[in-house]
Amino acid sequence: MIAAAASASCATGEVTIEDRSAETTPMPSSVIADDHLTGIISTQSLPTTTTTTITSDDAVGIEPLWPGGTVNGVAENFQAADPVTIRIPSIQVEAPIIGLGLRDDGSIEVPEDTDQTGWWRDGPEPGEQGPSVILGHVDSRVGPAVFFRLTELKAGDRIHIDREDGTTVTYAVESSEHHAKDDFPTEAVYGATDEPTLRLVTCGGDFDRNARSYIDNFIVFASLA
């Protein structure tokens, strides 16, 4: 279930970063979840990313390129389709992806269903240049949730993102990190990258029963396979 206030969330604390561009996309002022998801992030805006993904109707599994390239003759700057499913074979995850926007208070929405994941839709679609960010619950009051085994991922493990046009983009895990809630790496997660990248975010560390919140965030960093 979704907590009604930030005090019941897994909070990363307040983080501010420098605005690097006149053209910006608003960042979440907070990431609010139930007892078991991501944390509160307070930031200034990050630069928008330019869409440079290459896809085609029959290019399942193809690696999109960034500025200056084509794949199978498909022109660059093609808009990638929205993600619909995440598959992580090494930890037996196959789950729907829903789009997440911002609430009126600037906090990011979270999936109500703990077996769903959520993609921050104001960021790049998976396969486009820049970081695509997907959030998932680690558990719920009744048991494990979609990202319960996320900490088991190792470098090289594949993450497949199926898109609504039938194409699939595949990432390989590069690294993972635990961060205390007052030390969330906002720039590393949401900051612009030269190539398509993926970040998976959930809660981790010990559970503070008084605050009803995990004390850490666990973040997986991945790049195109």
Image (cartoon, rainbow, N blue to C red):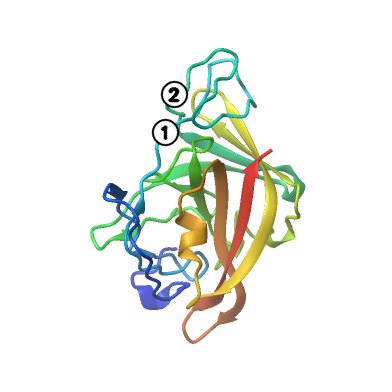
Frontmost residue, 99 versus 139: 99
Q: Residue at x 40, y 72 (%)?
A: 15
Helix, strand or loop at disc 2? Answer: loop
Frontmost residue, 176 versus 92: 176
Position of residue 77 relative to residue 4, above or below, is above
Q: Is residue 122 left or right of residue 199?
A: left
Question: Callout 2: 10 Å neighbours few (<14), some, many (20+)?
Answer: some
- Residue 28 at x, y percent in the picture: 35, 59
- Mark 2 belongs to which amino acid? Phe
Q: Residue at x 31, y 49 (%)?
A: 25
Tell me, yes or no, whether the two marked residues, 1 and 2, touch with CB atoms within 8 Å.
Answer: yes
Task: Kindly identify which residue carries mark 2.
Answer: 78
- Mark 1 belongs to which amino acid? Thr
Task: Kindly identify which residue carries mark 1.
Answer: 51
Along the polypeptide, which appears first: circle 1 or circle 2?
1
Frontmost residue, 173 versus 39: 173
Position of residue 113 relative to residue 74, above or below, is below
Helix, strand or loop at disc 1? Answer: loop
| Label of residue 9 in the image | none
Q: Quadrant of the N terminus?
A: bottom left
- Residue 26 at x, y percent in the picture: 30, 53
- Residue 225 at x, y percent in the picture: 69, 38
